[in-house]
Structure formats: structure tokens, C-alpha cells
Image: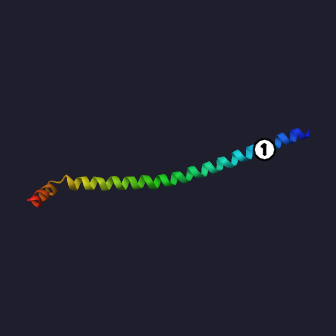
Amino acid sequence: MGIFDIGFVAVVLAFAYAFYEQRNKTKVKLQNAGAGSEALQQEIADLKQRVATLEAIVTDKSYHLKQQINQL
């Protein structure tokens, strides 16, 4: 095995290690994004429930009656 063969193997191993490290960093980022995604999904569900409640209040007949009385 010559000096150029050893150099070539060293370069290939360095690239393989760099690829491995980048893959691990990407995996960690995806896991962190997944945890944040669950929190966002819960917040969206809570907001949808609040909007549904507000829609029920505004479309209630007694709400419109109170508005008309207040306008008089």
C-alpha cells in the first residue's frame, strides 16, 4: 500500500465522518421540530375551540336582541 493509497483512504474516511455528523445533527433538528409541532397543533386546536365558542355567542338570538336594545 503506497502513500497515495493511505492518503486516499484518509480523505474518504474524513468525508464519511463528516457525513455521519451532519446526519446526526439533522436527525436531532427533526426531532426538535416534531416536539414543537405537537405544541403548535395543540395551540391551534385550542384556538379553534375558542373561535367556535365566540361564533356561538355572536350568532345567538339573545345577543342580537341585546344589540338592538342597546342601539335604541
Describe residue 31's horizontal placement relative to residue 13 as left or right.
left
The crowd level at tag 1 (other Cα within 10 Å; few <14, some 14-19, many 20+) is few
Q: Amino acid at mark 1?
A: Leu
Question: Residue at the location (16% across, 57% down)?
Answer: 63
- The residue lying toward the viewer, choosing from 71 and 51, is 71
The furthest residue to the right: 2
The furthest residue to the left: 72
Measuring from the top left, give residue 68's x and y in whole percent: 11, 56
Q: Is residue 1 above or below residue 38?
A: above
Measuring from the top left, give residue 3's x and y in whole percent: 90, 41
Measuring from the top left, give residue 7's x and y in whole percent: 85, 42
- Report which quarter residue 9 is drawn in: top right
Q: Which residue lies under the disc numbered 1?
A: 13
Question: Residue at the location (43% across, 52% down)?
Answer: 41
The furthest residue to the front: 71
Which quadrant of the figure contains the C terminus? Answer: bottom left
- Report which quarter residue 2 is drawn in: top right
Question: Residue at the location (21% across, 54% down)?
Answer: 58
Measuring from the top left, give residue 36's x and y in whole percent: 49, 54
Question: Residue at the location (74% across, 43% down)?
Answer: 15
SS under mark 1: helix
